[in-house]
Amino acid sequence: MVKIFIPSKNRYNTISTHLLFPEAQVVVHHAAQAGAYKAGGVANVIISDTLADEYGLTRQREWVCNNLVEPGEWFLFADDNIQELWAIPFPHYADDNLREIEEAMGTPALASVVNKYRPKNGRVMSPEAFLKIVVPECIAKAEEVGARMVGFSVTDNPLFRTKKWGTTSYVSGKMFLLKNGSMTWNHEITMEDFRNSAYHLARYGRVVINRYIHPRAIHYQPGGMGTAEERIPFRERDIESLMVNYPGLFRRKKGEYPDLSIRIHGEKHIDKWRASL
């Protein structure tokens, strides 16, 4: 069974991911936090003794890689506020394309076809099925294409998940599989998932995204890396740094809140971008 680690900070009253994965280890920064989590009913708590600053998440992740996982071993990182695993329901999960949606594009039938793939009682995948079915196939896909990191969908809308696999997209830090030894950790970036996606695309040329799985979670809760408002100054600086360090890969999203998106799509374009670095 793949190892699972949940880095957490000051969310002993709101942490939820451990309820999905009771075997996971919750990684906290120091003994006082460990006591609070244990008092709140979290059993598997481990102390990293890493600095709990704005970059504490990457410090925890690096510590896990250096101390709890073997070189070359695949394992799972998950944020502490995941509530459910939403999926394209079986038997459609076994298909690589949701062709019925693709064929309904631009027709009046589109809405009803899309709703077929998100029934209220069918889209919640059990953690057992995720670990037994999804994780092994994701690792196999990554090994096949030469990727060392696997992410999942950032949306539950089947309209944007008609193809199961992607290989050149953004990997959300909400939940991801990682092959240990494939990553360096930057403790000067809070938008770490953008940086880590860029790092893997630049170094290996491929990541893997399983779009059929969406970890449903609450975003920007107090604790952790802070609320959306608290993160703004760091994100403004991060955006400038990422666009300099990975020229041509990102574009700044429109809107008041500072955010990025990957502007290059497809393996040929990523290969061309890598060659220009």
Image (spheres, grey):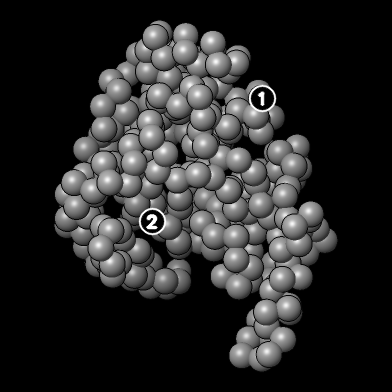
Question: Is residue 108 visible from the viewing direction of this image?
Answer: yes
The residue shown at (28%, 58%) is 257
Residue 274 is left or right of residue 173, and the answer is left
Count of numbered circles on the image: 2
Left or right? Give the position of 172 relative to 104. Answer: left
Image coordinates of residue 230 in percent, x first then y, are: 26, 41
Secondary structure of the residue carrying numbered label 1: loop
Q: Which mark is residue 201?
A: 2
Q: Quadrant of residue 164?
A: bottom right
Q: Where's the C terminus, which quadrant?
A: bottom left
Q: Is residue 81 left or right of residue 262?
A: right
Does residue 77 appear anywhere in the picture? Answer: no
Residue tagged 1: 22
Question: What amino acid is at disc 2?
Answer: Leu
**Which residue is nearer to you in this view: 99 or 232?**
232
User: Which structural element holds mark 2?
Assistant: helix
| Quadrant (top left/top right/bottom left/bottom right) for the N terminus | top right
- In the picture, residue 121 is in which quadrant? bottom right
Q: Is residue 171 left or right of residue 43?
A: left
Mark 1 or mark 2: whose residue is earlier in sequence: 1
**Front-lying residue, 215 or 143:** 215
- The type of residue carrying mark 1 is Pro
Residue sitting nearer the eye, 223 or 259 = 223
